[in-house]
Amino acid sequence: MDPVRGHRNPRVADSARLHRARERRERGRTLIEGPNLLDAALEAGVRPQVVFALDGDDRTSLLSDQHGFELVRVDNSALGRLAGTKTPRGPVAVIEIPTLPGGGDRGLLVAWGVSDPGNVGALIRTAAAFSWDFGHTLGTADPWSPKVLRAGAGGHFRIGIRVVESVAGLEEVGFIAVAATVDGGVPPSRLAPGLYAVLVGEEASGLPPGVVEDSAVTVTIPMPGGQESLNAAMAAGMIVYELSKPEGEGQG
């Protein structure tokens, strides 16, 4: 079959609309780009509805034969409209946004109003690295946007992702709410083992005061070098690492 040519092709244009948050919400679908994300989705049992790939992409063609998804060949113009990167090489897949069950005994890393897609993706990647689940509040960048998916590096397909409405709601289901702040908190190494929900806010403004007040614990990473703050994902990774240590290791 000849490849689909041109960015105006109706099927290409229809799929490209999934870059819009409203389209994703209404259709329950999103786009994933690149071989690594496609591999991660397939390994998690997520079968694409359709995959667009350049002519000559033999690797994706083999995956189509193995997993039974529809493969549509496209030219560079069509792929450019589907992809979110400047120099895409594909493939780009349309998938249903999965509902993956989280672990009942896992910690939860919560992005509280984090608006930057790169930061949200990095937080999801951090959560997945430590087998924690991920939560997000209203005002946080859509975790299933193509930009966040790229930054998440496949972490989306290995953990549970949920909406968080309040600190009280977290505590009702058994989490100990931990507010990450730039000062005034205890070092994370001081906390005893437990089922924690670590709350991380915007890099510039941090968590809302009311969220900090409602949380059971406030933690701050000691920074003897005098740096004012850390990148949100870096700080979250350090906190989650400390709280993931086996009982008796590192706490005190």
Image (spheres, helix red, strand yellow):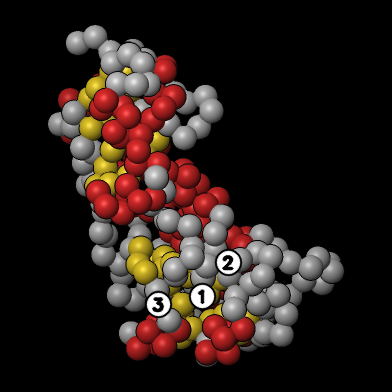
Examine the rendering and report whether any part of residue 63 can be seen. Answer: no
| Image coords of residue 163 (percent x, y) | 37, 69
User: Is 129 drawn above or below residue 64 in the view shown?
Assistant: below
Nearer to the camera, 78 or 162: 78
Question: In this figure, which residue is indicated by the disc labeled 1?
Answer: 198
Nearer to the camera, 14 or 34: 14
**Does the CB distance between marks 2 and 3 fall below 8 Å?**
no
Disc with the residue nearer the chain's start (3 vs 1): 3
Nearer to the camera, 46 or 32: 32
* Local secondary structure at mark 2: helix
| Image coords of residue 222 (percent x, y) | 74, 75
Question: In this figure, which residue is indicated by the disc labeled 3?
Answer: 165
**Does the CB distance between marks 1 and 2 fall below 8 Å?**
yes
Q: Residues within 10 Å of mark 2 (few under 14, many from 20)?
A: many
Give the distance between the C-alpha atoms of the residues marked 2 and 3, in whole angstroms. 20 Å
Where the C terminus falls, by quadrant?
bottom right
User: Which of label 3 and label 1 is nearer to you?
Assistant: 3
**Residue type, mark 3 in image:** Glu
Q: Identify the residue at image location x=50%, y=47%.
A: 151
Examine the rendering and report whether any part of residue 5 can be seen. Answer: yes
User: Is 156 drawn above or below residue 8 in the view shown?
Assistant: below
Question: In this figure, which residue is indicated by the disc labeled 2?
Answer: 236
Disc with the residue nearer the chain's start (2 vs 3): 3
Disc with the residue nearer the chain's start (1 vs 2): 1
Q: Residues within 10 Å of mark 1 (few under 14, many from 20)?
A: many
Where the N terminus falls, by quadrant?
top left
User: Is 11 drawn above or below residue 163 in the view shown?
Assistant: above
User: Is 147 drawn above or below residue 166 in the view shown?
Assistant: above
Q: Is residue 155 left or right of residue 121?
A: left
Q: Is residue 182 left or right of residue 10?
A: right
| Image coords of residue 103 (percent x, y) | 31, 69
